[in-house]
């Protein structure tokens, strides 16, 4: 394998591992919120990260969930995420069934 090919492959692996969404406040990750919102958006968290590719169609839902924890998603939404001000003023949605158990 040529050195250039190896470098390109390594760069791709590093980029894919860094593509994780998090619920944050002031740049600090909230692992509890991230894990819950990842599940809520249909993804599966890995530690305190939510792989962006597992929720790529639900980034807005992830952002909405983060807002219920008074956090912000660090992943951009392709069609625009809900406005933070609107989410923070809205009544929180019903607690997910799993949390009541």
Image (cartoon, rainbow, N blue to C red):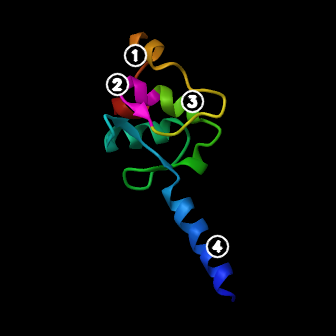
The magenta segment: 65-73
Q: Give SS at disc 3.
A: helix
Q: Is residue 64 left or right of residue 11?
A: left
Residue at 39%, 23% (x, y): give it. 68
Q: From the image, which quarter does the C terminus lie in?
A: top left
Task: State which tag comes first along the sequence, 3 or 2.
Answer: 3
Mark 4 — residue? 8
Indicate which label's residue lies in the foreground, 4 or 2: 4
Q: Secondary structure at mark 1?
A: helix
Residue at which label 3 appears: 60
Q: Is residue 81 left or right of residue 45?
A: right
State the residue at coordinates (54%, 37%). Answer: 41
Q: Left or right: where does residue 21 sit relative to residue 79?
A: left
- What residue is pinned by disc 1? 88
Instruction: Decide which of tag 4 and tag 1 comes sooner along the chain.
Output: 4
> How far apart are labels 4 and 2 at the CA level?
39 Å
Q: Magenta includes 16?
A: no
Q: Alpha carbon of mark 4 to alpha carbon of mark 1: how far?
A: 42 Å
Q: Say if mark 1 contacts mark 2, CB within 8 Å.
A: yes
- Residue 50: x and y in percent read 47, 48
Give me the residue at 55% from left, 30% from top.
61
The residue under the point 43% across, 55% down is: 46
Which mark's residue is nearer the viewer, 3 or 4? 4
Q: Earlier in the sequence, mark 3 or mark 1?
A: 3
Is residue 58 placed above or below 92 in the rendered structure?
below
* Separation of marks 3 and 2 at Cα, in angstroms: 15 Å
Is there any visible trace of residue 54 in the rendered image? yes
């Amino acid at each position: 394998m040529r050195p250039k090919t190896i470098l390109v492959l390594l760069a791709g692996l590093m980029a894919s591992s860094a593509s994780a969404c998090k619920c944050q406040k002031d740049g600090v990750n909230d692992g509890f919120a991230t894990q819950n919102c990842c599940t809520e958006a249909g993804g599966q968290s890995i530690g305190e990260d939510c792989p962006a590719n597992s929720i790529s169609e639900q980034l807005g839902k992830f952002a909405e969930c983060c807002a219920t924890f008074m956090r912000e998603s660090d992943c951009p939404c392709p069609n625009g995420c809900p406005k933070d001000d609107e989410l923070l003023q809205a009544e929180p949605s019903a607690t997910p069934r799993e949390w009541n158990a």
